[in-house]
Every structure is written in structure tokens, then in C-alpha cells.
């Protein structure tokens, strides 16, 4: 698909999300043409590697966009999530939200190798994650957007930040909102945007979760909803009863918890707006998903209804929100470095 063109009338949430999340300095420093002369084919290289990976692993698209999310909400979009443990680094890969669930690191390494072969020492791992997220969505039938580039890579990771900033699949809507509010509060946001921040946190976080329109989840992340929701000894009452029975077959009560099921039971490998219809039908797999529609009085209920009825509106707003998220505290100029190996800092 061609990149979406945004106007004030068609981009439903773009204007308000921009106010909270576009960092005015970073916006000026990142550019869609950053590699126009130094690595003009970088987008094609990234897309080709992902297309190849999809042939053997249909889950990889969802896994790659998740890496971008989990990177950006810990110290900003700086590829810190890719760093391995070292004598001076506690890897974010071992944080609770990532351990034994974050994946796609091998594909990122393959992309980096292909990019280095074409343009050595030029393209950052942080930009590779941003490009991979766009390609993953587009190749899965979703929108395309002009990825702003020019990020540099961090010299360290923040495991404790990953543990506190990234919501788990078990949290209530109020807890999720609080975590995202705290995350954005740590970013360098101009004071003229602060007044808009809190009322837009929930809207932005909603787009992150709506990427669950494709991909898989392990039973351990939602089995409590099937048998002992909030310690009641009963299933989550918001779960559709037929869907509940299907999930209980996939995830028996005494099972290992590692079995996989589709986040979207209707179109599990396609990026589309069925996610919103699922929520309307009480078929949100994760608690964090269903809370957005089933929480009484939640502002997100009207968003669910709107995007369930208009895939175009969802695609436009999702693409713009991804551009805005990519502007969370990037390292630019002389900050950080361009890693030659995404798993470790140069010289280590």
C-alpha cells in the first residue's frame, strides 16, 4: 500500500496524539529522507528480509512491531531492547514483559547484516526497528507510512525501566493508563504540550494494544481469565461464553501455559480492524484488550465502535500514532552511536 496521506479531517486522533507525543526537537531532527544519499535502499532491504522471514514464520511480523513498542517505551526509541547482558548491561530481554516472550531478534540481526553489507556503519539499529515495524504492518495488509529516521543507538539498557514501564497483559485500564502516564512523564516533552498529555495517554496506549490484531499469545498470559479471574474462582464474566470454551480447550487448567493461541480468532495473520469487532463481541484475548471496551464509562468505548465500523479510520490513526511514537526521545546528532552489531555496543 502507498503511504497514507493525513489531513486534519481524516486523521481522527492524529492531532491530539501529536500534542502529547511529538517532541518538538526530535521532530525537527528526524527525517523520512535521512538516508536518501547514504543508504537509499534501506527500506527495501528491510522489507526483503522480513518477507523472507515470513515464509517460515508467519508470527514474525507481530513480533517485530512488538519489539519497536517495547523499545520506545523504555528510555525512548534507542534500540536498548536489543542489547544482550554484559559486564555493564542488564539486558531488557530479561525483564518480565520480554523474558521468553519477546522474539524476532534473529531477524533484526539478519536485517542488520544485510544493511551493513550495503551501507556499512550508516543505519542505526533503532531505525531498523522503526522500519521493521512499518514493513511488518504493511506486509500483513495494514497501512504504510513514511518512517522518520535519524535515530542513534543507546550505549546501555534499562531492565528496571522495562519492568515498570511496559504494562502486563493482566492489568486494569486504570493501571495501564498510570503506567503510560509515568512513561511519558520521563520523556523530554515541551511545556506547551503538558496540558494535553494526560487526556491523550489513554488514546495513544490504545493504539499500541490494537496492534494485537495479529500475532499469538501464550496461555500463561490470559489463563487466569479462564478459571480464576481476580481470585474469584470463576472465569472473567466479560468473556464470550463460546470463546471461553474454545480457549479452555486450548489452555487446560493444569497445562504448561506455553501453548499459543491467536490474538485475533478471525484473521490471525492479517492487520485489519477485526480486533475492534472482537472487543465488541467480548472476544478480546488479553485482559488489557477487553478492558478497553468493557470498562464502564471508558473513553475508549467510542473509539472501538468507530474503528470497528471504519478500517480506513483505524489505519489512518494507527499510522500517525506510529510516527508519533517513533519520536519518543530518540538519540540524535552526536548522542549514542551506530552499532555495528545490534546485540552489543561497539568495542565491547
Image (cartoon, rainbow, N blue to C red):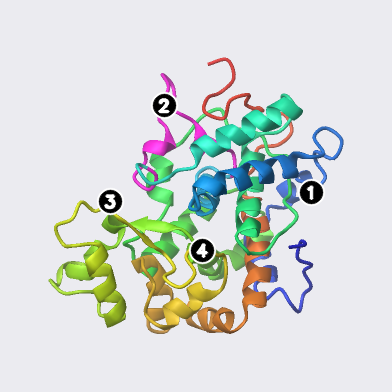
Q: Reading the chain from its start, which is encountered first: label 4 or label 1?
A: 1
**The magenta stretch spans residue 23:** no
Q: Reading the chain from its start, which is encountered first: label 4 or label 3?
A: 4
Q: What residue is disc 4 on?
A: 205
The dot on residue 32 is 1
Q: Is residue 39 above or below residue 167?
A: above
**Comparing labels 1 and 3, the label whose residue is closer to the camera:** 3
Residue 301 location (% of width, % of height):
48, 81
Q: What residue is disc 3 on?
A: 258
User: Who's the residue at 66% across and 28% down the image?
Assistant: 338
Cα distance between the residues tagged 2 and 4: 29 Å
User: Who's the residue at 79% across and 73% down the image?
Assistant: 7
**Comparing labels 2 and 3, the label whose residue is closer to the camera:** 3
User: Who's the residue at 80% across and 38% down the image?
Assistant: 35
Q: Reading the chain from its start, which is encountered first: label 1 or label 3?
A: 1
**Comparing labels 2 and 4, the label whose residue is closer to the camera:** 2
The N terminus lies in which quarter of the figure? bottom right
Relative depth, front residue between 142 and 19 = 142
Query: Where are the magenta residues, as a range?
Result: 77-98
The dot on residue 85 is 2
Q: Reading the chain from its start, which is encountered first: label 2 or label 3?
A: 2
Q: Secondary structure at mark 3?
A: loop
**Comparing labels 4 and 3, the label whose residue is closer to the camera:** 3
Q: Secondary structure at mark 2?
A: loop
Would you say the residues marked 4 and 1 are in contact, meaning their CB atoms lie under 8 Å apart? no
Amino acid at each position: 500500500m502507498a503511504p497514507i496521506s493525513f489531513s486534519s479531517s481524516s486523521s481522527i486522533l492524529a492531532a491530539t496524539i501529536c500534542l502529547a507525543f511529538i517532541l518538538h526537537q526530535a521532530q525537527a531532527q528526524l527525517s523520512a529522507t535521512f538516508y536518501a544519499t547514504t543508504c537509499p535502499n534501506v527500506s527495501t532491504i528491510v522489507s526483503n528480509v522480513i518477507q523472507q522471514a515470513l515464509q517460515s514464520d508467519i508470527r514474525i511480523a507481530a513480533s517485530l512491531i512488538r519489539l519497536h513498542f517495547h523499545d520506545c517505551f523504555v528510555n525512548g526509541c534507542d534500540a536498548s531492547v536489543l542489547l544482550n547482558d554484559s559486564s555493564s548491561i542488564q539486558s531488557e530481554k530479561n525483564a518480565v514483559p520480554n523474558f521468553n516472550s519477546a522474539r524476532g531478534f534473529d531477524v533484526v540481526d539478519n536485517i542488520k547484516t544485510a544493511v551493513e553489507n550495503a551501507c556499512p556503519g550508516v543505519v542505526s539499529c533503532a531505525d531498523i526497528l522503526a522500519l521493521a515495524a512499518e514493513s511488518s504492518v504493511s506486509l500483513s495488509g495494514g497501512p504504510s507510512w513514511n518512517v522518520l529516521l535519524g535515530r542513534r543507538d543507546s550505549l546501555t539498557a534499562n531492565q528496571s525501566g522495562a519492568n515498570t514501564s511496559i504494562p502486563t497483559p493482566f492489568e486494569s485500564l486504570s493501571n495501564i493508563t498510570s503506567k503510560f502516564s509515568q512513561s511519558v512523564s520521563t520523556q523530554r516533552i515541551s511545556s506547551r504540550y503538558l496540558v494535553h498529555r494526560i487526556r491523550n495517554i489513554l488514546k495513544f496506549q490504545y493504539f499500541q494494544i490494537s496492534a494485537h490484531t495479529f500475532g499469538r499469545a501464550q496461555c500463561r498470559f490470559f489463563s487466569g481469565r479462564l478459571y480464576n479471574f481476580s481470585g474469584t474462582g470463576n472465569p472473567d464474566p466479560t468473556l464470550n461464553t463460546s470463546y471461553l470454551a474454545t480457549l479452555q480447550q486450548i489452555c487446560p487448567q493444569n497445562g504448561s501455559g506455553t501453548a499459543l493461541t491467536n490474538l485475533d480468532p478471525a484473521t490471525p495473520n492479517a492487520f485489519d480492524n477485526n480486533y475492534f469487532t472482537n472487543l465488541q463481541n467480548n472476544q478480546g484475548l488479553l485482559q488489557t484488550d477487553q478492558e478497553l471496551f468493557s470498562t464502564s464509562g471508558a473513553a475508549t468505548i467510542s473509539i472501538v465502535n468507530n474503528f470497528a465500523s471504519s478500517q480506513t479510520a483505524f489505519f489512518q490513526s494507527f499510522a500517525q500514532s506510529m510516527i508519533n511514537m517513533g519520536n519518543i526521545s530518540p538519540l540524535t546528532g552526536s548522542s549514542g552511536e551506530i552499532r555495528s552489531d545490534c546485540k552489543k555496543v561497539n568495542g565491547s
